[in-house]
Amino acid sequence: MTDTFYMKRALKLARRGEGRVSPNPMVGAVIVKDGRIIGEGYHERYGEDHAEVNAIRKAVGTIEGATFYITLEPCCHFGKTPPCVESLIACRPARVVIGTTDPNPLVAGRGIEALHREGIATVVGILERDCRELNEVFFKFIQTGMPFVTLKFAQTLDGRIATATGHSQWISGLSARRYAHRLRACHDAVLVGVGTVSADDPELTVRHVKGRNPLPIVLDSKLSISLSAKVLRKRNGRHPLLVTTERADPEKRTLLAKAGIEALVVAGDSRARVDLKAALAELGKRNLSSILIEGGATVATSVLQSGLADRLIVIIAPKIVGRGIESVGDLGIRRMDHALAVSWRKITRRGGDLILDGRITPEDKE
């Protein structure tokens, strides 16, 4: 078997931690000796042991002289757990194969240097692109302090997210809605505008699938949200977060505070709405590394116009309604060669609906 074969196995293991390890990266590890796997593990939950330690603990027989495959450079600093590189060195493997370096300034090549100092042969860059894509959320967050932003919306074949009367439930089928709930479970927070709350009264939970409920966030520049809105209910021991501006009704803010609901005040934009970039910066400071934005059209348009979306997921239902509410409003683009470019990573089908999963092309982002 080749290095690529075992790194693919490590990547598969790493993905099992999705939705459970944030803001840490997903990491998988495989230990191979005499042509067979003697141990493997992955980072299972934030605050618990990392992939390397789990693989060592589960190993059958001695690890000395084995080859260790890890999707990400082993950490070399004390955090929630001790440095993984020390546990690795203590096992005396003959060789360590690493998918990609860790961008965390506390690591950033130091784990690899530690292995070199101990005379352990080290190879870096096996399936590097796959290993980096696996942790695109972590890479962006650790390098910029800003959350990774996924913009998701469901639309009809003719690009409508609601009929002319505003009716929108349901555009997509149950299978696609389950997919959307799994998507929520993989993000730290799910964000909507107060218009969506008023129109649909969403719960923003993962009730259709198993997984953790993300933190609900509502953009509401005036705090006009109804106190009976479902999204304001306390779940998982925490309340939702409202993001507002200085225009917020002070009496409403007091009422919300008494109910344990925080209203985070950020700067307003040129239209006196919540400045999205300022809001995301504040959310990053709260260790929220990934945000799923579910719209509606006003928020989706602002996110795209501001160049803040990293990932775009569009669920297309095989329905045509004609006149209605368009999924994205005016972006100020007047020439086709100025259009935002999207590179599709995956196109799948759930029931009768198509799910397009892409990334905003970097050179077209601000």
Image (spheres, helix red, strand yellow):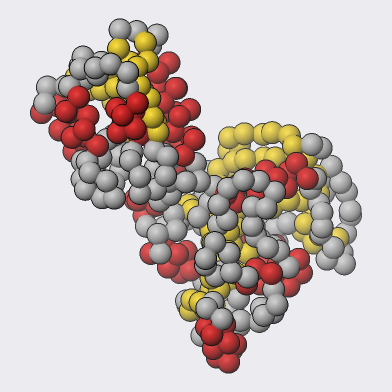
Name the outermost residue toward the bottom: 251
Which residue is rendered at x = 82% and y = 57% of the image?
169
91 or 221, nearer to the observer: 91
Residue 37 is situated, as x and y percent measured from the top left of the image, at 37, 15
Residue 71 visible here: no
Which residue is rendered at x = 55% and y = 57% of the image?
214
Residue 319 sits above or below residue 250 on the image: above
Direction from residue 236 to residue 161 in the image, left or right: right
Residue 352 is situated, as x and y percent measured from the top left of the image, at 81, 37
Residue 164 is situated, as x and y percent measured from the top left of the image, at 87, 64
Residue 316 is situated, as x and y percent measured from the top left of the image, at 76, 44
Residue 134 sits above or below residue 22 on the image: above
174 or 317, nearer to the observer: 174
Residue 4 sits above or below residue 293 on the image: above
Q: Quadrant of the N terminus?
A: top left
Query: Residue 331 appears in which quarter of the rendering?
Result: bottom right
Query: Residue 197 appears in which quarter of the rendering?
Result: bottom right
Direction from residue 366 to residue 197 in the image, left or right: right
Residue 287 visible here: yes
70 or 302, nearer to the observer: 70
Which residue is rendered at x = 67% and y = 34% of the image?
347
Which residue is rendered at x = 46% and y = 36% of the image?
134
Q: How many marks?
A: 0
Direction from residue 150 to residue 7 in the image, left or right: left
6 or 102, nearer to the observer: 6
